[in-house]
Amino acid sequence: MLTCDTPNVWTQFLEYVKDHCSPAAYGNWLAPISCVESSNEGITLEVPNVFVQDYLISNYRQDLCAFLPVDGKGNPAVKFVIAAPKAAPKSPTPAPTTQSAMPAASSTGDKRCVKLNDNYRFETFIEGPANQFVKSAALGVASRPGQSYNPLFIHGGVGLGKTHMLHSIGHYIQDHQKNLRVQCITTEAFINDLVDSLRNKSVDKMKRFYRSDIDVLLVDDIQFLQNRLNFEEEFCNMFETLINQNKQIVITSDKPPAQLKLSERIIARMEWGLVAHMGMPEVETRVAILQNKAEQKGLNISNNILFFIAEHIHNNVRQLEGAINRLSAHSRLLKETLTEELVEKTLREMLQQAPKARITVEQILKSVAAVFQVRVSDIKGSIRTKDVAVPRQVAMYLAKEMINESLMTLGISFGKTHSTILHACKNIEKKVAADEMLRRQISMVRRNIAA
Ligand code: ADP
Ligand code: MG
């Protein structure tokens, strides 16, 4: 790895990366880089601009280390030079191979924006206590864009309906205020767009588009802006311009603003309006979602079975949909009646039975006791002081997550009712969102159990 056949390392790296990324990403980001010098000590790369440099380092640091010489600190030994701008005035870098891999440079807003998914509407969003707040905030924003909360920041885990909510806002505004120009972008597309514009010398056009051709901007997955310093600043400028003109902005993210690795300036901006958390729907809401999806598929499933699925799939709404799709395919193919056994068989992989079955409540109790420094007997007992009550709820929360048993059975193991377990889970889910220390303790318990 260290003594490398220098002229080739960059080519080898490129060949490797080419197989591991999309042709568009390759064409946009990697192909424009050329290796201008290389030795055993390091290489010098010529990049069209600082964004490409930034992209390379933030996305391929490890791969670069594997292929290129490494410096004393374990970083890839790469120097960058920015390509001289003289070639540009006539036409953007006319390298034929890169051009063919690149999407045609368009100056309209069309390619920048995501088409709203027709199924993602308020009417198809099932409400429950965990997402009611987000939904009413979203409706508020959609009814009076730019006049209520601005920005609206929606955060929550994967597959919980953030994109669904974002698109619902877009549809609602398009349906009710046809004069407003709604644009929905993913953060990745924004970054790609910015890079394209830089390469094509059309940044001004792009800026004009984002700053004056938009009334409502919907931004999906802002977490992808993390560690992209140069893009962050441009995003922040655009954000401020729009907000200052009372243009509505809605942002989704997998974390709350304060936990994003972004500058204080942009975090503060995102906290200006309303920050709303999208939680995992409770079991009753999950049943309602399943019911709804089953109806859409014309699938007849008993309530018992819906409840069974809802109890077993508890961290991702997309998986609930997946379960219904699978069952639908299965029952169509085999023309069998859906019994609990058949459902269990069909969904086995999804229910993650194998890893769950191996863990016992006793193991969890021991591990929780060790991490929180309390006695197992206290956790099992009924003392209600905070230093015991929190670890007790954590144990219940982890038991529900890691053990493939019904709430009823878990309740019995803890000498409590199933609703106590459910309450504990909700409480911990809520606490975890705001308490970094607790998150660490819980992951320590998990690691302990796995070890
Ligand atoms: P995220 O963006 O949070 O990862 P998505 O918005 O892509 O999640 O949601 C995943 C899938 O689950 C989508 O098909 C969405 O329609 C569906 N979904 C999520 N929450 C709900 C809900 N409350 N009611 C109905 N469908 C939902
Ligand atoms: Mg999403």
Image (cartoon, rainbow, N blue to C red):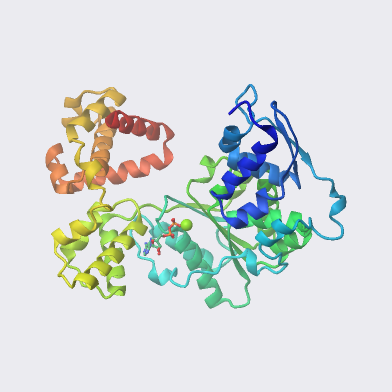
Does residue 362 sit above or below 289 in this rendering? above
Location of the C terminus by quadrant is: top left
* Residue at image point 31% right, 74% down: 296
In x, y percent, where is residue 141? Answer: 53, 64
In the image, taking residue 155 as reference, residue 128 lies left or right, namely left
- Is there any visible trace of residue 263 in the rendered image? no
Question: Where residue 55 sits in the image (x, y, percent)?
Answer: 64, 44
Q: Residue at x 67, y 30 (%)?
A: 77
Is 35 placed above or below 210 here?
above
Q: In the image, residue 434 lies at what x, y percent?
A: 43, 40
Q: Is residue 331 above or below residue 203?
A: below
**Does residue 39 appear to the left or right of 350 in the view shown?**
right
Residue at 57 percent of width and 65 percent of height: 114
The answer to whether any part of residue 28 appears in the image is yes
Q: Could you say which quadrant of the image residue 378 lies in? A: top left
Residue 259 left/right relative to 373: right
